[in-house]
Amino acid sequence: MPAAAVEPTSRLRVVVGEEELLRSRAVAAVRAAVLARNPQAEVHELAAAGLPPGQLADVLAPSLFGGHRLVVVTGVHEAAGALADALTGYAKAPDPDLTLVVVHAGGKRNEALLKAFRAAGAAVDECPKLTSAGDRAAFVRNEVRSSGGRISADAVAALVDAVGADLRALSAAAGQLVSDFGGSIDADAVARFHRGQAEVSGFTVAERVLVGDRAGSLEALRWALQRGVAHVLVADAIADGVRTAARVSSLASTNPGELARVLKMPPWKVKKAQAQSRGWSIEGLQQALRVAAELNADVKGAAASADYALERAIRRIVAIRAQTGRGSRVRSGR
């Protein structure tokens, strides 16, 4: 597996490679190391695309207040010539009280910038795409081990075959397997896990959103999208769940049969909505309905990324529940 070239608080650092997960982990490791040594350090993260050199110069200029700073410039393969020149010039005389990390997605664009940083003594984190089954198997073993588990060779092969090359999906699956099966994973555990995951739908995502399970919602979303569930179906399921919870909560009666007659819904759906609406306030559900309406437009073309729109909406709805919910009074039934 790729490893940091030198100690992670080096004043100049290059994170380069096609694998986004490894890049993000490398940047996170630098951030953690810097903040461990300098808890009050300023942290700046800038995207290189469209970044004016003057704004970069302001961030890199010596601070009037002293103290250490961490500056991360992402996507430097997309940096304009003037910005690349400014970064190259800075590398010739870096500020000892500043850690500068440049993140490059690999390829030939702005390769000269990386060469200049290497020549200046920058530490380098290589984050190549894991193209072989052996590399992905090693990744899975490391992920399981870091989660405190053990996995058999046939289970590793089964997991890689089932999930494929997406490291985020492999990492999520490895962590969930350790959690679900007590840390000892064999091929049968992988098979059982995937039989369950194959049933993930937009309604699975919606159910987890409504009960405030952010991690579970996002994991279910990733599985649903990976299995080809359309973005619009997930958005529709979330909207339907929020609307149904709002309709059930708006009526005084708690009798499922009576609510089913009034709302013209099957009793099982009323009961599910009652369970999902616990912990919600009417105000919170109204806010969630607005988010669901925005999401509907986003997944139909208003947003640049439907994946991101779904993740953002899930986070917003879960946050609304936490901020406006009726708390322990409702959850305990008092």
Image (cartoon, rainbow, N blue to C red):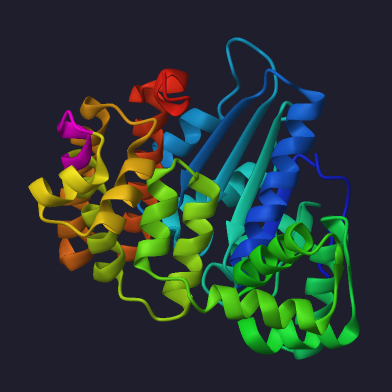
Seen at 73% across and 20% down, the residue is: 39
| Location of residue 108 with respect to 322 vertically, above or below | below
> What x and y, as percent, mark residue 8?
82, 44
Find the residue positioned furthest to the top: 65
Height in image: 304 above or below 290?
below
Horizontal arrangement in the rendering, residue 252 relative to residue 203 (left or right): left
User: Depth check: 54 or 236 in front?
Assistant: 236
| 293 in magenta | no
Q: Residue at x 32, y 49 (%)?
A: 271
Left or right position of 271 against 303: right
- Of residues 186 and 40, which is closer to you in this image? 186
Position of 321 with respect to 133 (left or right) is left
The residue drawn where x is 43% and y is 43% is: 211
Which quarter of the figure is the N terminus placed in? bottom right
Q: Quadrant of residue 253?
A: top left
Residue 43 occupies quadrant = top right
Residue numbers of the magenta segment? 247-253
In the rendered image, the vertical position of residue 52 relative to residue 232, given as above or below: above
Spot occupied by residue 44 in the image (x, y as percentages of width and height) = 54, 34
Which quarter of the figure is the C terminus placed in? top left
